[in-house]
Image (spheres, rainbow, N blue to C red):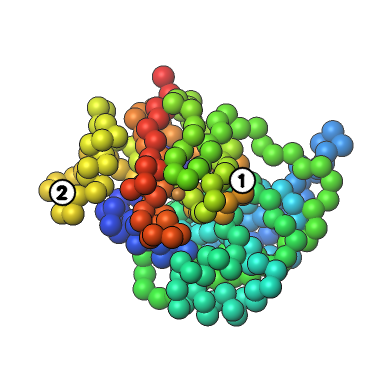
Amino acid sequence: MGSHTVPVRLSGLVSLLLAALLLSACAQQAEIPPTGGEVAGSELLISADNANITVPEQVSGGLTRVTLTSTADAPLTINLARLNDDVTLEQFMQAFQEDAIGAVSLVRLLGGFDVVAGEDRTFSVNLDEGTHIAIGFGETEGPPLVTPFQAGAAEGDLVPPESVASVDMQDFAFVMPDRVPAGEQVWEVTNSGSQWHEYVIVRGEEGLTQEQLMEMLMAEEEPEGPPPFEVVDYFGPISEGERAWVQVDLEPGNYFAICFLPDAASGTSHVDLGMIQEFAVGE
Ligand SMILES: [Cu+2]
């Protein structure tokens, strides 16, 4: 990831994440050959450009390694979701245009990333049989771009990738290691809460405390000068009970995991309810 820095102001970030739920492209699907009698799951390549998200119409179900890639000029937020069995794509799109957050009750959220051209992002997730969508948001005006695809029935014993850390997202806390290694790795990310959760990874300048960061996040006025922190990564919302194996690549430093999603009942941001966790990377 390295240069995967999203230089957005927090307020812009929040609206992006909420709107977060635009785009399209070229995709392929290939079976990973079974190893040792086990099926490692299938691969799903989702490609975006300025105008489209392209996904194969039909993919194998079960544990799937999803790779998101983009050639768009600006960063795109691409998320996956499965439509509930009694919901049609038309119903979801209409509901989404009327009330984007309310439309979340019509789907199972399966995660996603901010994708920058030239930097592929990968995660593994279970795709149950049924209609799914890839939904993309950018910084441009206009409705999100949505491409539907069908997942089939899972076959065989599926093996998730090896992970170095488990990140449990609860109402409203992150339960995760105090320290993770630097560099490329996989986190097993679980939502064991009762509503949607996501994480934004913020890197703080050395010595920045959680209290100081919270104070800046809560401030009504925009701070003068550059903030002593930057948003370096993001994994999109997953619904309660969902799990994903997420590619992560962080440099050594001082970090915070934060969930900015609104509480289903009150609308209060999860971070205001305590959903922030400091952790260290490397050394
Ligand atoms: Cu949350």
SS at mark 2 in the image: loop
Observer-nearest residue: 52 or 82? 82
Instruction: Count numbered badges in the picture.
Output: 2
The residue at which mark 1 appears reads as 243
In this image, 112 relative to 265: left or right? right
The mark nearer the N terminus, 1 or 2, is 2
Relative to residue 216, is residue 47 drawn left or right? right
Depth check, mark 1 against mark 2: the one in front is 1
**Amino acid type at image mark 1:** Arg
Residue placed under numbered mark 2 in the picture: 223
Label 1 environment density (alpha carbons within 10 Å; few <14, some 14–19, many ≥20): many
Viewport quadrant of the N terminus: top left
Asked if one can make out residue 73 in the rendered structure from this viewpoint, the answer is no
Q: Which residue type carries mark 2?
A: Pro
Residue 95 in view here: yes
Residue 239 versus residue 64: which sits nearer the camera?
239
Q: In front: 235, or 92?
A: 92
Residue furthest top as drawn: 283
**Mark 1–mark 2 CB contact (< 8 Å):** no
Q: Position of residue 27 (x, y in %)?
A: 64, 61
Q: How far across and down, in percent of the image, does residue 142 sit?
A: 40, 76
**Residue 207 lies in quadrant:** top left
Residue at image position (29%, 53%) is 10
